[in-house]
Image: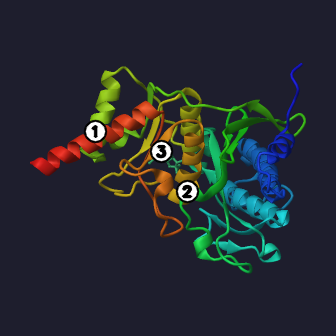
C-alpha cells in the first residue's frame, strides 16, 4: 500500500525548502485547504438544492440559503481571518480589498476567486477556487491597495481547487507543482500528482469557438492552424477545469481580446496570475499575446487581460503569428 502523504504533512515537509520560513505561509496554505474541504462539501450538496432550498430562500431548518459563490467567499474569508497569518484579502465577490483587523500586522495578503465558473453548478460541470498569496509591501498596520496590486512574479504561492469528479487542490510555492486529491472518507487532501509537468507539445486547443468572428486575425489564424494540424478542441467554459486539463494533458487555453471585450474577460489578479504561476512552474508559458502575464502591471483589482497559456510550443506559435503579422502591418 502506498504511503499516504496529506497536504498538511507535505506542506510541513516542504517548509524546509524555505530556510527562513517561520510557518506563516504553511499555515495559510492549510487554512485554504480547510476552506476548500468545506466548499467541496457544499458544492457536492448543490445538486440537492431542492431539499436544502435554492439560494435566497430558507432551508428546512429555516436558515437562509446563500448562493454558493457567496458562501465560498465567506468561508475563505472566515478561514483566513482565523489563520492570523493574513492582513487582508481581495476577492471577485468584493468591490475593494478587505483588511483583516485582528491580524493587521500579518505578513501576507491573499487574492482569490472563491468559486470560478459557478454558473455551471446547476449543470454539474466542474468549477473551481483560485488563490494567490503575496507578501505585503506596506508597513505594519492596516494593509493598503498596493499590497494587492503587485506583479504576478511577486506571488509567493498560488493554486486552485477543482471541484469535479473528484476534488483536487493544486499549488506551487515556486518550487514545482503538486496536486492533492480529497479523500472524503478521511477528510484529507492526499498527494496524488507529485511534481506535475505540462507536456511541452500540445495537441488540444481550448477557446470559446462561438466568438470566432469576434477574435482578431492572429487568433483566427492560430485556430485555423490548430484545426489543420489535427488538434482536438475541448472547452468546458470553466477556467479552472480547462486549465487543469491543459496542465495535465497539454495544449493551450485561450481567452483572447474580442471586438466586444477588448481586454478579454478573465481577471489578471485572481484568475490569470495565479494560474499562470502554476503553468510556468510546470514548464509551460502564459502571455497576453505580447507580454508575459506575470509581468503585466496591475492598476486595479478587477482588471482583465487576454490570455494564452499552456504548452510552450503552442504559446510560442501564437506569439510568432502576432509578431510576424505586426511586422507585415508595419511594412504595408
Ligand atoms: P465564456 C466562467 O464564467 C468564467 O469566468 C471562466 O471560468 C471561464 O473560462 C469563462 O468565464 C467562460 O467565459 O465567455 O466562454 O462563457
Q: Which residue is mark 1?
A: 321
Name, please, the residue furthest toward the front. 19
Q: Which disc number belongs to residue 286?
A: 3
> 132 and 135: which one is in front?
135
Q: Secondary structure at mark 1?
A: helix
In the displayed structure, does residue 264 sit left or right of residue 11?
left
- Label 2 vs 1, first from the N-terminus: 2
- Label 3 vs 2, first from the N-terminus: 2
Q: Position of residue 57 (x, y in %)?
A: 72, 61
Q: Is residue 296 visible?
A: yes
Position of residue 23 relative to residue 140, above or below, is: above
Q: Position of residue 278 (x, y in %)?
A: 60, 43
Q: Which disc number belongs to residue 152?
A: 2
Q: Secondary structure at mark 3?
A: strand
* Cα gap from disc 3 to disc 2, whole angstroms: 11 Å
Q: Count the labels in the image.
A: 3
Residue 106: which quarter of the image? bottom right
Amino acid at each position: 500500500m502506498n504511503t499516504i502523504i496529506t497536504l498538511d504533512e507535505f506542506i510541513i515537509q516542504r517548509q524546509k525548502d524555505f530556510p527562513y520560513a517561520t510557518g506563516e505561509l504553511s499555515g495559510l496554505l492549510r487554512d485554504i485547504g480547510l476552506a476548500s474541504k468545506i466548499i467541496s462539501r457544499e458544492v457536492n450538496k448543490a445538486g440537492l438544492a431542492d431539499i436544502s432550498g435554492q439560494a435566497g430562500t430558507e432551508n428546512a431548518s429555516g436558515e437562509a440559503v446563500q448562493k454558493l459563490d457567496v458562501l465560498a467567499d465567506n468561508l475563505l474569508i472566515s478561514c483566513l481571518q482565523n489563520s492570523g497569518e493574513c492582513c487582508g484579502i481581495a476577492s471577485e465577490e468584493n468591490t475593494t480589498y478587505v483588511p483583516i483587523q485582528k491580524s493587521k500586522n500579518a505578513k501576507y495578503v491573499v487574492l482569490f476567486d472563491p468559486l470560478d465558473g459557478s454558473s455551471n453548478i446547476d449543470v454539474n460541470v466542474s468549477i473551481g477556487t483560485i488563490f494567490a498569496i503575496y507578501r505585503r509591501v506596506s508597513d505594519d498596520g492596516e494593509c493598503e491597495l498596493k499590497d494587492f496590486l503587485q506583479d504576478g512574479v511577486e506571488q509567493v504561492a498560488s493554486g486552485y481547487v477543482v471541484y469535479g469528479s473528484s476534488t483536487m487542490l493544486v499549488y506551487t510555492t515556486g518550487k514545482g507543482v503538486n496536486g492533492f486529491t480529497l479523500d472524503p472518507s478521511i477528510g484529507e487532501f492526499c498527494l496524488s500528482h507529485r511534481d506535475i509537468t505540462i507536456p511541452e507539445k500540445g495537441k488540444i486547443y481550448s477557446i470559446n469557438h462561438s466568438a470566432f468572428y469576434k477574435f482578431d486575425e492572429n487568433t483566427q489564424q492560430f485556430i485555423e492552424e490548430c484545426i489543420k494540424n489535427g488538434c482536438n478542441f475541448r472547452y468546458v467554459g470553466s477556467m479552472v477545469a480547462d486549465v487543469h486539463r491543459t496542465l495535465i494533458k497539454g495544449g493551450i487555453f485561450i481567452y483572447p481580446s474580442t471586438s466586444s471585450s477588448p481586454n478579454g474577460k478573465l481577471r489578471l489578479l485572481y484568475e490569470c496570475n495565479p494560474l499562470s504561476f502554476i503553468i510556468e512552474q510546470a514548464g509551460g508559458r502564459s502571455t497576453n499575446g505580447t507580454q508575459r502575464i506575470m509581468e503585466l502591471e496591475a492598476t486595479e483589482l478587477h482588471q482583465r487581460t487576454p490570455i494564452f497559456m499552456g504548452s510552450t510550443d503552442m504559446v510560442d506559435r501564437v506569439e510568432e503569428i502576432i509578431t510576424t503579422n505586426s511586422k507585415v502591418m508595419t511594412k504595408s
